[in-house]
């Protein structure tokens, strides 16, 4: 069964991913990163979170949807 889209449109997803990236960039400890991860994992998944954590730009994550 296919997963239902979480976001109404690509702009909403872009804004959400930019917010998550800012939170990950601001995290200074392992515990802070874990907290951000837990807060967003169910909505965007481990792949996107991992790529953001590694410093990939949001635009790169969204290219796969085009």
Image (cartoon, rainbow, N blue to C red):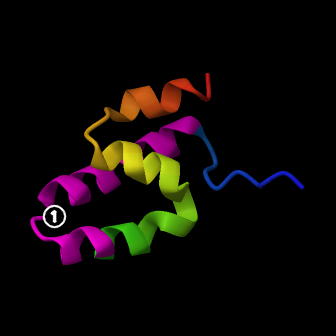
How many numbered callouts?
Answer: 1
Residue at 30% of width from left, 73% of height from top? Answer: 34
Q: Nearer the viewer, residue 60 or 8?
A: 60
The residue at which mark 1 appears reads as 27
Asked where in the image residue 32 lies, by quadrant, the reply is bottom left
Q: Position of residue 47 (x, y in %)?
A: 50, 48
Instruction: Depth check: give the residue in front, 31 or 63.
Output: 31
Is residue 4 visible in this depiction of the protein? yes
Q: Which residues are magenta?
A: 10-34
Q: Residue at 53% across / 56% down in the picture? A: 44
Q: Position of residue 25 (x, y in %)?
A: 17, 53
Residue found at the far left of this picture:
28
Category of crowding for the residue at label 1, using alpha-carbon neighbours closer than 10 angstroms: few (below 14), some (14–19), many (at least 20): some
User: Is residue 18 visible from the viewing direction of this image?
Assistant: no
Q: Is residue 32 magenta?
A: yes
User: Which image quarter: residue 66?
Assistant: top right
Q: Residue 24's spot in the image, x, y percent?
A: 24, 57
Residue 14: x and y in percent read 44, 40
Residue 11 to residue 34: above or below: above
Residue 18 among magenta residues: yes
């Amino acid at each position: 069964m296919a997963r239902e889209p979480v976001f109404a449109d690509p702009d909403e997803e872009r804004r959400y991913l930019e917010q998550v990236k800012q939170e990950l960039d601001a995290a200074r400890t392992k515990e802070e990163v874990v907290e951000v991860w837990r807060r967003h994992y169910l909505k965007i998944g481990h792949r996107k979170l991992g790529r953001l954590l590694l410093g990939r730009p949001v635009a790169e994550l969204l290219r796969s949807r085009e």
